[in-house]
Amino acid sequence: MPDFGIRLLGFGLLATLFSGFGQTFFIGLFGGAWRDEFGLDYAQLGLIYSCATLVSGLLIVKVGRWLDDVPLPRYTAFAVLTFAAGCALVALAPTALWLIPGILLLRLCGQGLMGHIAVTTIARYFQAGRGRALALAQLGFPLSEALLPMLVVAALGVVAWRQLWWLAAVALLLLIPLLLRLCRELPAPILNDSPDISHASRQQVLRDWRFYAILPVTLTTPFVITGLFFHQTAVAEATDWTLPLLASAFTAYALFQVSGGLLAGFLTDRYTARRLMRFYLVPMGLGCLLLWQQSATWEVFAYMGLLGLSAGAHGTLGGALWAELYGTRHIGAIRAMLHAVMVVSTAISPVLFGALMDAGIDMRSIALVLGGYTLLVPLLLGGSVLRPPSGAQTV
């Protein structure tokens, strides 16, 4: 590990931890309050969320690539300040339409830039042990998922939802000086000089058939989890699992996400991320099938734990896969493009699931379809990244 490695791991951990304010699991907890205050149904709220998420994905194609050129401290300060502004906009929203710009900034920075900064920086500065470093830096994701839902559910019984968003904005402002201290005076990253890596540009990636073949596998986790977590009140209504029980089960999700991330990090360093892509979604598929047939209260913890295993593996494998395939010179631009594509998938699932439920299809039936897809598609397409690029040329 480089001398500054501990600082960078702390930097990544804090960035992923505080990204929780812009993640679906956190925002979705306010869905009931927003529907009541603004008179929205499931589909309308899902449409607002999806529109904001989709626009944020388009913006990150441009904003995310700046990380290749702008100094890390300056870029980090910009991202966190914008994130805090999004929290303030949501807290001030007088009508449902005002939620759109607020959620847009939450998704751009929370779901997008905070994780983008952490993962891209770790992928650049760590060559040996990259998988384990990514797994450790991304422990902030499960930590926030373990802590925030229970805190929000408890707090909503005491204070108004707007006050919680003001607290989030203040917390982000206090975070800025700490992050800047951790990422100060970093040397230039050492590019991987492996003969198998040619540091492809974004245009070269778009000409590689493997990129399109593996997308359905890499997009499954954010698509499924965004849809299920955003509509977690609907999951509670379709099952015997109450919303407080679901919130408490996020602890199981977080614990297994940590386990999945750390295990994937160890296996990535030993076998490479490319060899693991066919198998990492199996727990998620089983979790969706468990939601479909749920018959006991304890099964909510198994359901959330299985989702967490795949989510943790996804974070580690997703951070390492693109560096393995395309190098690190243009990794900021490549990851920004990938994030935009991922955002499209996360923009689709809330409104799609909401429309299906408004049409009379319950969440358990949706879970059955998700389980079958999640188990089948990786087996068919996951091995594509082990094959040479189009025309066997070096990308």
Image (cartoon, grey):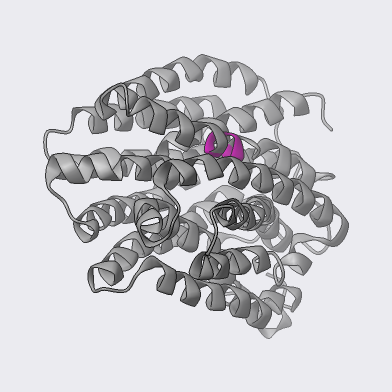
In the image, residue 271 above or below residue 98: below
Instruction: Residue at 65%, 47% (x, y): give it.
Output: 257
Q: Is 92 placed left or right of 132 in the picture?
A: left
Q: Is residue 202 left or right of residue 62?
A: right
Q: Position of residue 202 (x, y in %)?
A: 54, 61
Question: Where on the picture, by quarter, is residue 363?
Answer: bottom left
Task: Please check the rendered image and state whether residue 269 is part of the magenta-colored stretch, yes or no.
Answer: no
- Point 46% across, 36% down: residue: 149
Relative vertical location of residue 61 with respect to residue 185 in this rendering, above or below = below
Relative to residue 111, is residue 212 drawn left or right? Answer: right
Q: Which image quadrant is residue 231 in?
A: bottom left
112 left or right, relative to 162: right
The N terminus is located in which quarter?
A: top right
- Residue at the right extreme? 270
Query: Residue 262, can we see it?
Result: yes
From where the camera sits, is residue 120 visible? Answer: no
Which percent across, then down, holds residue 206? 53, 70
Q: x%, y% of residue 132?
A: 78, 44
Seen from this angle, which residue lies furthest front? 296
Q: Magenta residues, as a range?
A: 141-145
Position of residue 28 measured from the top left corner of the image (x, y, whole percent) = 36, 45
Main secondary structure type of the part rendered in magenta: helix
Residue lying at 76% horizontally and 29% vertically, measured from the top left? 5
- Looking at this view, is 334 or 53 the one in front? 53
- Residue nearer the viewer, 318 or 146: 146
**Camera-side residue: 280 or 176?**
280
Decide: is 356 above or below 120. below
Labels in figure, total: 0
Query: Looking at the picture, does residue 226 appear above or below residue 172?
Result: below
Quadrant of the image containing the C terminus: bottom right
